[in-house]
Amino acid sequence: MNTKDHFKLGLFSANCSGGLAVTKIDERWGATWEENLRMARVADEAGIDFLLPVARWIGYKGDTNFHGSVLEPIPWAAALLAATQRISVFSTVHTAFNHPLVTAKQIATLDAIGGGRAGLNIVAGWNQPEYETMGVDMADAHDDRYGFAQEWCDVVREAWERDEIFDFEGKFFSLKHVEALPKPTGGRVPILNAGSSKQGRNFAGRNSDFVFTIVGGPEDGEGIVQSVKSQAMADHQRAVGVLTLSHVVCRPTNDEALDYLNYYAEENADWGAVDYLMNLQGLHAQSFTKEMLATMRSRFAAGHGSCPLIGTPDQVAAEIARYAKAGFDGMTLAFVDYVGELEYFAQEVLPRLERLGVRQPLSAM
């Protein structure tokens, strides 16, 4: 994740059944360990920069219970870091459900396993039913959730940065004689958080290396990138990278790509899960505006509301180049099949991105 002058590409949500495709097709992603291991090895060999999981404990109902089966990110990352050579692997951690000192040690251990390739994705929380599952109260106010997350992050940072035994006294945590070894390589790992709300972007500007944000496309994304980066510099004197998320359907012809999109995301969409998910997003999250939610039902079925990359290898490469030109530092990819479709993407799209000057050749990384 430290490569400069290089548009970063990662894989998102492969640890979750369905990935980002809310579909009923028989061949939908199962997110088994065997599938994830094959995915990681293909991505590692192809030069994909990072893997980003989702942390989830209950599914999104519908006919398939989308995201009903999820490999937990910490052991998932440990196994994948041990099985790969160069790719970075993030762990997604919900602050409300995980003690910060436990997380600090877990991430430091992952970083040792991967030789400096671990990352941390911090989630302040939004999914009310999961709080009920965990028996934890979710603060109604977005500010309160991020206030807790900020103190949680402060504890993690102290654990990584302080060599001596220390105490920590805050509003939410009162910790005595803390010992925190080992430390991550270089004293910390890359931190990412989703930041589409005002509070999320401010949190990212203060704490994160990358803010992961929802956009409509490269057109509105350009202004969002400029706003996020300028705010982080003005408020916290920090430079942050900005990432967005996408779903990919890449085929030899545009008609083939559109036909497959229609097959899995229209004819066979799990509309019950789509509507349940969109309702939760509208009630408790601020990742999507009300206007976006009102017009994005099909896009949720295709890729959980992420940006579409649909078409031939030339079309997909050109669209990714538009995001790079808009100022994004990278984006995540999701496929219906994270193995077979990723292999085709690596063979056909990555060389085109190199020729466009968006990506460096693998030999240069």
Image: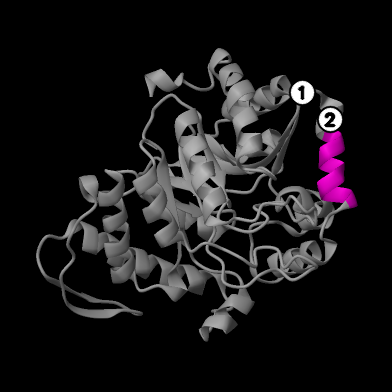
Left or right: residue 107 compared with residue 14: left
In the rendering, which numbered label is found on residue 215? none
Left or right: residue 267 compared with residue 18: right
Q: Residues within 10 Å of mark 1 (few under 14, many from 20)?
A: few
Q: Residue furthest top?
A: 355
Q: Confirm or deny contact between disc 1 and disc 2 (CB under 8 A).
A: yes
Residue drawn at x 66%, y 69% is: 59
> Spatial distance from mark 1 to mark 2, Cα to Cα?
7 Å
Residue 327: x %, y % from top left: 55, 31
Looking at the rendered structure, the secondary structure element under dot 1 is: loop
In the image, residue 30 above or below residue 319 = below
Looking at the rendered structure, the secondary structure element under dot 2 is: helix
Residue drawn at x 56%, y 49% is: 35
Q: Residue furthest front?
A: 34
Q: Nearer the viewer, residue 165 or 118?
A: 118
Amino acid type shown at disc 2:
Glu
Left or right: residue 213 compared with residue 74: right
> What kind of secondary structure does the magenta stretch mostly adopt?
helix
In the image, residue 274 above or below residue 174 = above
Work out whether residue 227 can be spotted: no
Residue 128: x %, y % from top left: 62, 77
Q: Which residue is mark 2?
A: 256
Q: Tell me how the rendering is colored.
A: one colour
Work out whether residue 104 can be spotted: yes
Residue 28 sits inside the magenta stretch: no
Magenta region, residue range: 258-267
In the image, residue 173 above or below residue 28 = below
Amino acid type shown at disc 1:
Pro
Q: Which residue is mark 1?
A: 252
Q: Nearer the viewer, residue 352 or 284?
A: 352
Quadrant of image for the N terminus: top left
